[in-house]
Image (cartoon, rainbow, N blue to C red):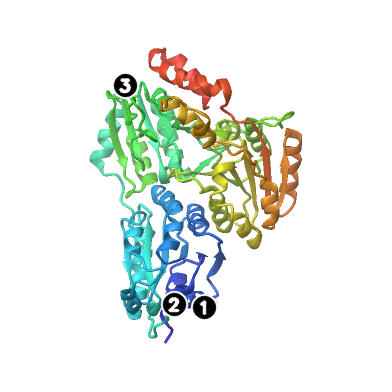
Amino acid sequence: MPNGAQALMKTLADAGIDVCFTNPGTSEMHFVAALDSEPRMRAVLALFEGVATGAADGYARMADKPAATLLHLGCGLGNGLANLHNARKGKVPVVNIVGDHATYHVKYDAQLQSDIETVARNVSPGFVRTSQKTEELCKDAADAITAARGLPGQVATLILPADVSWGENGQPCVVPPQPVQPVADDAVVKAIAEAVQSGKKTAILLGGQALREASLLPAANIAATCGVKLFAETFPTRIERGAGLPPVERIAYLAELAGVQLADVEHLILVDCKAPVSFFAYPGKQSYLAPESCTVHTLSSPEQDAAASLHKLAQVLHADSATPALQQPQRPDAPRGRLTAPKVCKAIGHYLPENAIIVDESITSGLMLNALTEGAPRHDMITLTGGAIGQGLPNAIGAAIACPDRPVFALIGDGTSMYTIQSLWTMAREQLNVTSIIFNNASYSVLNIELERVGAESVGSKAKSQLDLNRPVLNFAQLAQGMGVHAVRVSTAEELNKALEYAQSHPGPHLIEAMVPESMNGVKRKILPWILRSLPNLPLPVTRALKKKIAP
C-alpha cells in the first residue's frame, strides 16, 4: 500500500491536477519524495510562497482547472496569503496544500507551531480541513478538489500533518465529476427582458466567466438589438479581447470616473459580478457607484452558467441571430523618441502577436494600455483582481505553464514587481516564454495620486519619501540577469522596439526595464483631484470626454 503522500499524489493526478507550485519545508518532505512516484505531476519550485500561490492563480485562470500549491506550515501560508486573496477575489480554483507538524507533535508548541486553520479561513472561507488520518487523507483531498473547481471557483485549503503524509495504507480516491451548472430561471430572464425593453437606459455589467467569448457574443447580440451598453468589471479575472471579439468598456478604477460611466444608467444587469463599488472609501464620496435611481438586476450569479444565461436572455429578446459589433483590427504605429509609459503601451499594441496573454499589473503606467491594444490580434488579459500587489510576475509563470504555446507579456510596475521579484528565477529555471516589462518610474505613483485624492493636509518631505523609490533607483535589468533572465534597460522608444523584436525572435524569458517618468506627475497630479471634484457639476458629455482623456 502507498503511504499517504503517494496516495494523495495519485488522487490529484487522477483528478487532472498535474501541476504543483511548491515552496516546501521539513514537514512536507514525504510529499516532495512522492513527486517521483507520479510521472503525471509537474513540480515547479518557487523561492517565495507568494510566487507559488500567484503562479497557481495564473495557471488556473488560463487552464480553467486548478493547480496545487505546497506550502510550509502557517508561516509559509502567511507568506502566500496576498496572492491567495487575489485568487479568492477572482473566483479562481486553487487546491492549497499546507504541511503541518505531526499530529502528536502539536501539543509541544514547537517554534513553527501556529493555528493554520484560522490563517487559512481568510482566503479559504468555503473549505479548510486538517486531515487527521492517512486512511482519510485522499477523501479529504477529493472534497478539497470538488470545492475548488465548483462554481464559483475557490481556494480550498487542505492541511497535511507530517505523520498523515508518511503513514501507510494511503487509499487513492476518485473525485466525482463536476455537476451541470444551473442557468438563470425563466422568471428572472423575463423580468430582465422587460427592463431591457422598457425604453430606459440599460447596461449589462459582465464579470468572471462572462468575459469569455461564449458570453461576450450573446451579450453583444443583445447590445446590437436592444441598444444596451456593455461594461466589464474593473479588474477582470480573465478577459478575451482584441480584433474579432466584441469590445467591452471596463469600469474605471477612479470612482469619480466610474460614476461618469454609469451616470445615466437606469437599469444595470449583473452577469457573474456584483454591483460596482469604489476601491476605497473617500471623505464625502459615495462608495456604491450605481446611481440611486438605477435598478440593479442579477441575470446570473457566480454559481450559475453565465454564457447559457445570456443566450437564454438573447433568445427571449429575439437577439440571438443579430450581427454583433466586433472590434476591427487596428494597431498603433511603433513609438518614437523619449520613452514614456503611454509609448510602452503603444509598443505593446504595435508588436503584440496573435494569441498572446497580457498580465497587467502596470498600475498608473498602464492607463493607455486598453485603448492601445483593443484592436491588436486576439489575446487574453489577466488583471489584479484583489488589489494585493505582487500578483503579476507570479501570474505570468502560471499562465506560461498553462499555455506553453502562447507568448506571455507581463506589464508590471516597479514597486509591485519587488513584492515577488523571485518569480524571475522560476521563469529562468522553467525556461518560460515570458517577456516582463517593468515600468521604472522610481515611485509608488498610484499612492502619490491617492495622497492628493484623500485630502491629506500638510504633506511634507517625510511623508513624500514614503512614496518614492529613489535613493537608490532600482536596476531591474541587473536583478533579472542575476536570476538567469536575459534583460535590457531602455530609455528610448527605439531601444524598446528593438528589445521587443529581439524577445519575439528568441526563446524566453526576457525582461525589459523601461525607464519612464510618472504618467501622473507634477501639474497633472495636482489638478486631477480638482477635475474629479468638478465632474458632478459639469454636463455629462463634457465629463465623458474628460474621462476618455484621463483613462480611456
**Residue located beneath label 1 in the image:** 33
Q: Amino acid at mark 1?
A: Ala
- For label 1, count other residues whose C-alpha is less than 10 Å away and answer few (under 14), some (14-19) or many (20+): few
**Residue located beneath label 3 in the image:** 199
Query: Residue 526's spot in the image, x, y percent?
Result: 51, 21
Marks 3 and 2, the one that precedes in the sequence: 2
- For label 2, count other residues whose C-alpha is less than 10 Å away and answer few (under 14), some (14-19) or many (20+): many
Q: Give the spatial CA distance, label 3 vs label 2.
A: 61 Å
Q: Secondary structure at mark 1?
A: helix
For residue 266, side relative to residue 210 (left or right): left
Q: Can residue 321 be seen here?
A: no
- For label 3, count other residues whose C-alpha is less than 10 Å away and answer few (under 14), some (14-19) or many (20+): few
Q: Nearer the viewer, residue 124 or 250?
A: 124
Query: Residue 110's spot in the image, x, y percent?
Result: 38, 72
Q: From this view, report whether residue 5 is shown above or below residue 235.
A: below
Q: Secondary structure at mark 3?
A: loop
Q: Can residue 222 be seen here?
A: yes
Q: Amino acid at mark 3?
A: Gly
**Residue drawn at 41 percent across, 12 percent down:** 539
Query: Residue 346's spot in the image, x, y percent?
Result: 65, 32
Query: Residue 456's spot in the image, x, y percent?
Result: 42, 27
For residue 179, side relative to residue 513 (left or right): left
Q: Give the spatial CA distance, label 2 vs label 1.
A: 8 Å
**Residue located beneath label 2 in the image:** 5
